[in-house]
Structure formats: structure tokens, C-alpha cells
Image (cartoon, rainbow, N blue to C red):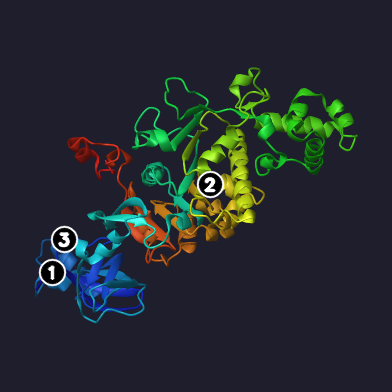
Amino acid sequence: MNMKVCGQIIYGTYGQILVRTKKDSDIEIGTLLVVEGNPKYILQVYDLEYGSQLEKGHLELTSGLELENKGNLYFIEEDIQNYVIAKVKAILEIFTNQDGTTQERIPKSLPRFFTMVKKVDREDVSFLNKADSGVYVGNLRSGSSQLEDIKIRIPFDRDIAEMLSHHILIAATTGRGKSNLVKVMLSGLMNNPSCGILIIDPHDEYYGRQSSGLKDISNAHETLQYYTQSTKGLTGKNVYTLAVNVRDIKPWDFSGVVFLSDAQMQAMYVLYGKKREAWLEELFNREPEELCDACGNVSKADSFAALKRKLSFAMERYYEDEAKTIFKINKNIGVNTISDIVHALTEGKKVIIDSSTLSSEAELLLASAIAREIFEEYKGRKKDGTLDKKETPVISIVLEEAPRVLKNDESIFSTIAREGRKFKIGLIGITQLASLIPREILANINTKIILGNEMLVERKTLIECASQDISTEDKMIAGLEKGEALITSIFTKFAIPITIPKFESLPELINNKEQKKKFLFNFKS
């Protein structure tokens, strides 16, 4: 018997094939198996159970005899009599054509009965290496092992811009490597001019102020821009002070950020209608009674007072020192910040906004203002027919704690989630709680990268909204270790298990071979 054989198909149905495993085959949940032939089948283990030739009563009797040192009732070799059954499902059929080329498709049949199976090797899945133009996310994983030669890049046979405009969700509990995955993905996009990336960074972890980050990717000084309130100790022409003039903030930027009553909403729009770009200057510099008179007494002074209080809080204008807030009334400060950011994105650059010093409301307001400007810019290009030109990059927005902005229908991000693909705008949402995102929005996110998650309700949500049938992968997702993930996407033929390398191990960052060897694919340590 071929020493590579690790089991044999003995029974089952479509979606639940039973494989008797060979002794010491070390098969785990998630292990990828192969049935040779034409078509060749790729199988995945999703559950394990014990099997035995002995009935339950005999097993209990044999156990009792061994426990009490009375011998045993084994009449034939134990490995023949007792074994492990692996429940597997076919995840891919691979046909070999007469000219030697291969064609992959979703399985629609069963492998031949009683055939032998072996563990997957590089030759079995070499077709995965064909996608050399996609976004690198890690290496193919089989159980807890990985095939280091099989680099997974998504999408396989589609344009990167199309995948980004269809949105990506990265979901996991804390400490499973979400931020590391984002950095790995972005490292492969840094020098790609076909996509502009806006990263809203509430933890100041992507640029690499204190450690390795996107600034260390080759040519980052040309393709990366970094906006922060604290530029102390930072040098380079790609570092900018984060300051936004209040004249660039519009009333609708507060949708989904600040709750306003109908009367306060009316007061805000009446004031904007009267003062246009200067509306916030008027609100902050004048008394409510003066605003009431200036607006023709359409809204009451109490409404202006409440509006002023709420917007001041959202824009962090409770500081006596204006230097502590990024939203500036001074007409000479931060005037072009938002337009400069949008212009950089339309040139395919990557822009990081360090929002670690901002309140949650200020961060959302800033992100909403930039996203709104992006949406309006590309909506205008759609109207004049220039959006579909090859040189117009897709723009993707990276959002931490995605439910904050996606659960509100009035948010610009909810609009982008529903309509963004029409305008070449996508979201990369990062979350621990996918269940808080409306199902309609989840259905519009066509690529989901699922890392480890012990919470049943979160796994259930992700499984129900996946692009492939992963209803049997619940146990696998619960058992994913740090740096392990499952990709489900309309841009892949099957849900792909991967191991994600440490960002610090990427060859774009490390030239020292010994250091690379230390880091490479050792994310669990």
C-alpha cells in the first residue's frame, strides 16, 4: 500500500463522506485530503469520531477488564478493531483536460466508493499559485500545518479592483491577529497604483511609529501619506499634521455621528442655508439668540443652544486651547486637508489617519467627511463618464470596529456598503462583533476573512452570511489559533484555510536571512 495513503472512503453522502483513517495518520479537523483520479477531489475534514468493530457492551467490558488489570478481550489487533472515522466533504473537483490544463469547479458528484485518500501536497493544489497578481494573505493551511510553497493571493482570476469594491470583512475576537492580517494585505497593495487605500487607525499601529509598519515597505515614501496630531520625532515629506478646517464640514457629515432632534436638525440646516461654509464658525462664535435672529426666527434659541453643545462635544471644542482639537476655526489652518487626502487617494496612494488621540465622535466625523468627499468625487466622475477609465483607481476604506458606522442607515459608510461598487469604492471592515452589522450590509460584503472566534452567535452570523456553504466549519472556526483564518469569497471556488505570516517576516521588510528565518511563519509564538 502506498505509504502516503492515510485513509479510505467507506460510506457517506454528498456533503458527509466517511473516511476510515489509517493508524498514526495524524488527521485533524481542517486537514485537506485528496482522492486521485480524473476528476481529482480535494476533501476537507470537518469532524472526527471513534469507530470500533466491538459493540458498546463489549467496549465497556473490555475497558473494565483493562482498568482492573484483568486482561482484555481483544481477539484481533487493536488497530484493526478500533479506529478513527473522519467526516469529510468535497470542496473542489479538478479536471485534467487532454492538453494537460486543469479546470476547477465546485463538486457536483461523489468520489468513487472505497477509494484511498492521502493528504494534500504541493502538486495537488499547484493551481492556487496561478493567481500571482492578487493580494497576498498567507499560505494554504491543512489542519494546523501549512503548505509553505502555496501562496494564497486573492482574487484568483478577477481584478483586484473588483474585489476591493465588493468589500472585505475581517472578523475575529481580540488577539487573533486582525491588525497583522490587514498590514500583510496592505503591504501587497502599497505599490499598486490601481487602488487608493484610506486607513482610519484608532490605535496608531499601521504606520509603524515605534516599530515595523507600512512606512518600511519599499517605496513607501512615494506611495504612503501619514496624518497625525503628533508629528514629534517624525521626518519625511509624507508626514502631515492632522488639522481640518470647519469650513470643510457639512451638516450631513454628522449623520450617524451625533443624535439630533428634529428641531435641532432643522436649526442646523437653516443655519447652513443662511451661512453656507461659515455655518460652524457662526454657531461657535455667536450666541443662540443672535443665531435665532440671523435665521429669521425659524428655529428657537434653545434649539441652537442644544445644537451648539452637541456639535462642540463631537468636535472636541470643549478645550480652551484650540490646538488640542483637529477641527480649526482659523481660516488659514487645515483648509485643504480633506481635498488633499481625496486627491492622493484618486492617484492610487495609501493614506493613514492616526485617530488614536481623537474621541469616538471626532474620529467618526472626520472619517465621514472624507468618505463623503470621496463618494461625491466618484459619483461626479460616474456622471461625466470618466469613472470607468483604467487610470481611475478603486478606493478602499479600512475601518476598525465596523459595526459603529455600518449599523446606522444614515451613515455614509452604509451608503457605500450598499452602492459603493457602482462607484469603485469599497470598505475593509474589521470587527469582533459581526452580528451587530445589519444582514443587508453583510450580504453586500462579498469577501469575508474569518479568524478564530469562540462566540457561538458570532460564528453563526458569519456562517450564515458566507459566500460558500461553511455550515460544517463551526468547530474549525472555534478552534482557529492566532494567525489562522478561513477565507470565504465570491472570488474563490471554495472556502480557503490559510496561515497568516507575521508582518515583520515579509521579505519586503527584512533582508537579513537569519532574522527572516526567525520570524517566518511563527505567528503563534
Give the residue type at disc 2. Ala
Give the residue type at disc 1. Asp
Residue 315: percent from the left, percent from the top?
65, 30
Residue 431 shows in the view: no
Residue 302: percent from the left, percent from the top?
84, 32
Q: Badge 3: how crowded within 10 Å, few (<14), some, or many (20+)?
A: few
Rendered image: mark on residue 471:
none
Q: Whole-Å distance between the Cαs marked 3 and 2? A: 55 Å
Q: Whole-Å distance between the Cαs marked 2 and 1? A: 51 Å
Rendered image: mark on residue 79:
1
- Describe the element under mark 2 as helix, strand or loop: loop
Residue 493 shows in the view: yes
Q: Earlier in the sequence, mark 3 or mark 1?
A: 3
Rendered image: mark on residue 67:
3
Q: Badge 2: how crowded within 10 Å, few (<14), some, or many (20+)?
A: many
- Describe the element under mark 1 as helix, strand or loop: helix
Q: Name the image quarter holding the C terminus.
A: top left
Residue for badge 2: 402
Asked if residue 78 is positioned above or below residue 407 in the image, the reply reads below
Q: Earlier in the sequence, mark 3 or mark 2?
A: 3
Residue 181: percent from the left, percent from the top?
38, 46
